[in-house]
Image (tube, rainbow, N blue to C red):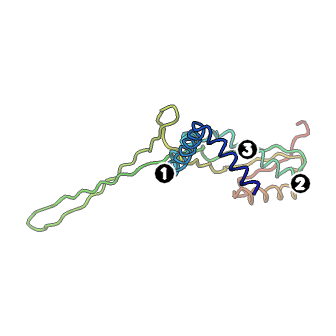
Amino acid sequence: MDEKKGLEGLLNGLGKNKKTVRYIVVLGIAGILLILLSEFLPSGAKNQGTAADEASPLVFSQEEYISSLENKILEIVTAIDGVGEARVMVTLKSTVEYVYATEENVTMSSVEENDETSNRGELFQSFEEAFVFVEDVNGKKQALYVTQILPEIKGVVVVCEGGDTLAVRNDVINALTTGLGIFSNNVYVTKLSSAS
């Protein structure tokens, strides 16, 4: 009952000032309309600010990729018993490749042959591929970025304190071939020089 009286008192107080009531009603209706209109906008229009960010490729250079691999490998290798201090070098088979969205247009055409021996038509198909472009926030057009393909590992060199021990070398080679999906002839393990 107290809540009902409090609400009635507030409404009666607002009722005395008709301009205030009109503003509140107009703002309420405008808010409801904005909410309803936002539901009918395409999802791309709702996230227009992020579309430009997705259109450009991630800044991920080959050097960063190699450095990241070397750090992860070093972390794993130094956790193996007997390895001690270590250095790691990774080589790759190729470079980082960026993939962009494309559209494919297929054109069908037919050629009819009419001669005395045959009466047949041949169907020809031609393909045309073009990049899909999007406009960023500044109005600049750029190809629509889809993903990047990371290169395969060509080889790994591990130089470590325990590299002269057969058991340590085998443990390191087994860890790297299993973890990286490479062959044992792509891994070289040797002893770290005492001068290092």
Which amino acid type is marked by label 1? Phe
Which amino acid type is marked by label 2? Thr
Q: Which numbered mark, 3 or 1, is in the foreground of this view?
A: 1
State if disc 2 and disc 1 touch (CB < 8 Å): no
Q: CA distance from mark 2 to mark 3?
A: 27 Å
Instruction: Decide: few, some or many residues near mark 1? Use Cα within 10 Å; few <14, some 14-19, many ≥20.
Output: few
Q: Which residue is mark 2?
A: 165
Query: Which part of the image, by quadrant, shows the N terminus?
Result: bottom right
Question: Along the polypeptide, which appears first: circle 2 or circle 3?
Answer: 3
Q: Is residue 28 above or below residue 172?
A: above
Q: Position of residue 97 (x, y in %)?
A: 56, 45
Q: Position of residue 9 (x, y in %)?
A: 70, 47
Residue 68 numbered mark, or none: 3
Task: Tell me the element at label 1.
Answer: helix
Q: Residue at x 88, y 51 (%)?
A: 83
Q: Which residue is mark 1?
A: 40
Q: Left or right: 38 with respect to 85?
A: left
Residue 75 visible in the picture: yes
Q: Depth check: give the residue in front, 5 or 68.
A: 5
Q: Position of residue 82 (x, y in %)?
A: 91, 53
Q: CA distance from mark 3 to mark 1?
A: 44 Å
Q: Depth check: give the residue in front, 155 or 119.
A: 119
